[in-house]
Image (cartoon, rainbow, N blue to C red):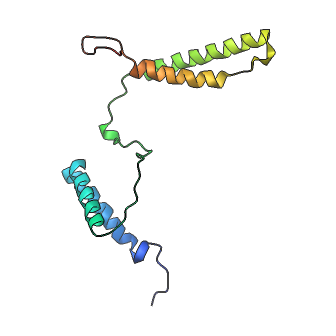
């Protein structure tokens, strides 16, 4: 008789869990994510009807939920944007160094400015849009 204690809940074997995962992968491959989501939703509903309390989370997954194969291409020129951001950060450094020549207790809030520069860079390059033939513009 095997005296080892199973590390899986209620004696569920790794092989059995792997079979479930492979089945889900097969459904994804043959029928797509919509069918897989429907099956998972029905399993969740069936578990609830049978008194199984599933953990609730109002948070979305922290990982990117868009599969790499479905992600659109980057809409901009990453190298140009990197260079612009580097120039903005260099400018922040130059302003702080110059200000510290006049007043030494100003401090060096370069990291604060650099963080704000990144937020503005993302906004200007990817969110805030001007009016065009296809878009009414941000109002």
**Residue 126: percent from left, percent from top:** 40, 22
The image shows a total of numbered marks equal to 0
Query: At x 42% / y 19%, what residue is drawn?
Result: 125
Does any portion of residue 10 appear in the rendered image?
yes
**Residue 110: percent from left, percent from top:** 66, 22
**Residue 105: percent from left, percent from top:** 79, 18
Query: At x 29% / y 11%, what residue is drawn?
Result: 132
Q: In the picture, residue 9 is in which quadrant?
A: bottom left
- Residue closest to the eye, 67 or 126: 126
Does any portion of residue 26 appear in the rendered image?
no
Q: Quadrant of the N terminus?
A: bottom left
- Give the farthest residue toward the right: 104
**Residue 23: percent from left, percent from top:** 26, 62
For residue 31, side relative to residue 69 (left or right): left
- Give the farthest residue toward the left: 31
Query: At x 27% / y 57%, what residue is drawn?
Result: 40
Q: In the picture, residue 63 is in which quadrant?
A: top left
With respect to residue 71, does 30 lie above or below?
Answer: below
With respect to residue 68, does 73 lie above or below?
Answer: above
């Amino acid at each position: 008789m095997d005296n080892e204690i199973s590390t899986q809940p209620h004696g569920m074997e790794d092989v059995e869990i792997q079979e479930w995962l492979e089945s889900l992968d097969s459904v994804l491959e043959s029928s797509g994510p919509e069918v897989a989501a429907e099956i998972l939703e029905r399993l969740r509903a069936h578990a609830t009807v049978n008194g199984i309390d599933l953990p609730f989370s109002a948070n979305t997954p922290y990982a990117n939920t868009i599969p790499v194969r479905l992600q659109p291409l980057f809409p901009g020129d990453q190298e140009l944007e990197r260079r612009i951001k580097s120039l903005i950060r260099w400018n922040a450094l130059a302003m702080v160094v110059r200000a510290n020549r006049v007043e030494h207790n100003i401090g060096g809030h370069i990291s604060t400015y650099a963080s704000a520069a990144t937020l503005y860079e993302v906004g200007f390059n990817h969110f805030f849009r001007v009016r065009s033939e296809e878009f009414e513009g941000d109002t």
